[in-house]
Image (cartoon, rainbow, N blue to C red):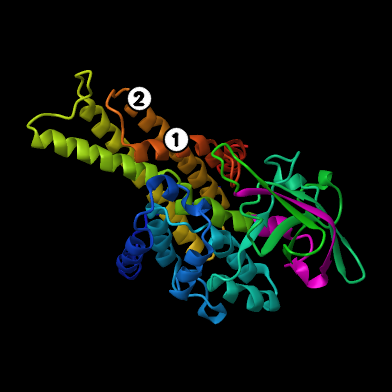
Amino acid sequence: MIGALQLQRLPPEAEALRAPVRAFLDEALAGMPADRRARSWLGFDAEFSRELGRRGWIGLALPAEYGGGGRDAFARFVLVEELLARGAPVSAHWIAERQSAPMLLRSGSEAQKRLHVPRICRGESFFAIGMSEPQVGSDLASVRTRAMRTADGWRLNGQKIWTTHGDHCHYMIALVRTSGQPEDRQKGLSQLLFDLHTPGITIRPIEDLTGDRHFCEVFFDDVDLPEDALVGDEGAGWQQVTAELAFERSGPERLYSSIVLLDTWLAHLRTRLRTGLLTGGRAESSAGGPHDDAAVALAGRLVAHLAVLRSLSLSVTARLATGESPATEAALVKDLGTEFEQGVPIAIADLLGADETPAPAELQRTLAYVTQFAPTFSLRGGTREVLRGMIARGLGLR
């Protein structure tokens, strides 16, 4: 059964991190337009990530023994929330810090931990995830990429797709089949860690509807890997991936993909209302209808919805902080969160479309980008249908 999520408050020592992070972002993001900031955790800026590393803000909750900050998950929650709320370009280090390093600390060898985790924390080593494959869809257990044992290690063949910034990353951790057949499902799956510059690897970016090229196809053609490329035990890949996905599915990034758009629209709304008060009237559309009432009502609904989702995400963070693996609860946060993220551009577009007064150009560009990209929110990290199946099983309904 799904575990009970308890309301959780951020401790004062975690909240104290907000002020220095905000001060840094005020300077680092000065002049960056909202439509660019809306990319946020898909925005790749290696130097920005290295600066975060120099400040000790990558791996904030990882052990100091391995180069981390030694703080708790709540401090990281505050940091991530501020970075995403402002639309900071964090994609370079994002996957490595969020998933790869915690997974290595949980399942990797001591040599893997010592080699990779400190470099991740310094913002020097970027990781890609090798999970999705063509013809597999969301059925992750039926992956076909295969690694066969050789005299010296492994020989890897197959393909991965939708690999975020694979063309810019240094390493990949891939879920592959090391024994059995795809029909065996979870049995025989393992995780391998390898350098993406290894001979036999070809990476091709995929251009999306917005014109961005952050997704990639990755091909493996007789790629020879050493024995120590294996992460954890052979055949334990499914259990490791399930634990890893709890980190991917429950964080603020599953709530805040539309947050720059929402904040940009709220700033526009505040300007409208302030202008109406200064002129002694109400902000109205050129057609004469009271536009402000509908806008204020929408703002209230969206902010209230976000507050509840944030509380859920924080509660899952508390479970992760105790070493649990709340996969079902994380799936719930991801499903509800991406539903909210996709609803924000639709609601704002409907409201602006009913107003004959044109919105500011920056708001229009931001809305256009988020609207085009929003369909992916319910695909990345597991489709809505798969997640709801997981939730149903967690509730004992199937």
Judge whether residue 322 can be spotted in this image.
Answer: no
Residue 368's tag is 1
In percent of width and height, residue 254 lies at 48, 48
Residue projecting furthest to the bottom: 65
Mark 2 / mark 1, whichever is N-terminal: 2
Q: Secondary structure at mark 1?
A: helix
Residue 276 relative to residue 102: left or right: left
In percent of width and height, residue 64 lies at 51, 79
Q: Amino acid at mark 1?
A: Ala
Seen from the viewer's position, the closer of residues 63 and 274 is 274
Residue 57 falls in image quadrant: bottom left
Seen from the viewer's position, the closer of residues 75 and 198 is 198
Residue 26 falls in image quadrant: bottom left
Span colored in magenta: 214-241
In percent of width and height, residue 105 lies at 61, 71
In percent of width and height, residue 159 lies at 77, 49
Residue projecting furthest to the top: 287
| 236 drawn magenta | yes
